[in-house]
Amino acid sequence: MTENRKIALVTGGNQGIGYEICRQLGAAGVHVLVGARDPARGAEAARKLAAAGADAASIRMDVTDPGEVAKAAESVAQRYGRLDILVNNAGVLLPEDRPSGSGAELVRQVYETNVFGVVRVTKAMLPLLRKSTGGRIVNMSSSLASLQLHGDPSFELGAFLMLGYNSSKTAVNALTVMWAKELAESGIKVNAADPGYCATAMTGYASPRTPAEGARAPVRLALLPDDGPSGGFFGEDGPIPW
């Protein structure tokens, strides 16, 4: 029964790291809502999770569509009455996104999903998170967002210069800090997670690090105890510099 389980919504939860977040949360006894733009792919992911023993359902959500986000919030409210965990995982990376070649339209396209989508979904779900006894918001970021790391010549990912993507994740970090400060008295904890450079469709499967490994940091933040941190930026091994 979902009344006795935490309820989590993971945007972009039908593949890659998002799917692994769903799987690991499901293994921890959380009822998982797989947010997906494509209803068929979302339903298939939920079926796979259920076959593996998770308590899962799918929910249609294109984070760039205000109408779909509003309908998703209404659906969660009607079915469950609350939301305990929101993982803002949906994101895009465009191959032509380079500092000297990215125009305003390309950057706007990236921000529409990576920044405005996070704002849109969080605003819609916040009333439901306030009804939880211990709400958690996890915003998927990246070490590529870190201005301090980019200022270090030894940064191992320093050659990945993507104007829209990197700056969008820096913006997500800023959102995380502000939401955490505003919601501090509510018990809702808000943190940013770096999954690391993982083998996913977004990266062309070019890394030995698996999506399962990438899901560890966001899952830990999604399941933080009441004395856990808020307003931080964390990878699997601990805090990451801003």
Image: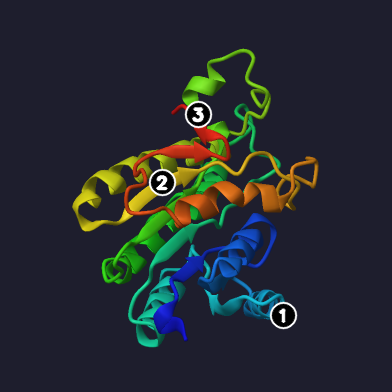
Q: Residues within 10 Å of mark 2 (few under 14, many from 20)?
A: many
Q: Residues within 10 Å of mark 1 (few under 14, many from 20)?
A: few
Where residue 81 sits, quadrant-wise, is bottom left
Find residue 59 and report its horizontal and vertical position in percent.
53, 78
Q: Name the element at disc 3.
A: loop
Q: Earlier in the sequence, mark 2 or mark 3?
A: 3
**Which residue is at 46% across, 27% downward?**
241
**Which residue is at 65% across, 63% downward?**
19
**In the visual, does 202 lie left or right of 180?**
right
29 to 135, vertically: above or below: below
Q: Earlier in the sequence, mark 1 or mark 3?
A: 1
Residue picked out by circle 2 = 191
Residue picked out by circle 1 = 51
Callout 1 amino acid: Ala
Q: CA distance from mark 2 to mark 1?
A: 31 Å
Q: Name the element at disc 1.
A: helix
Q: Residues within 10 Å of mark 3 (few under 14, many from 20)?
A: some
Q: CA distance from mark 2 to mark 3?
A: 15 Å
Callout 2 amino acid: Asn
Q: Earlier in the sequence, mark 2 or mark 1?
A: 1
Quarter of the picture containing the C terminus is top left
Q: Nearer the viewer, mark 2 or mark 1?
A: 1
Find residue 198 and report its horizontal and vertical position in percent.
71, 44
Callout 3 amino acid: Ser
Q: CA distance from mark 1 to mark 3?
A: 38 Å
Residue picked out by circle 3 = 146
128 to 236, vertically: above or below: below
Q: Residue furthest left?
A: 185
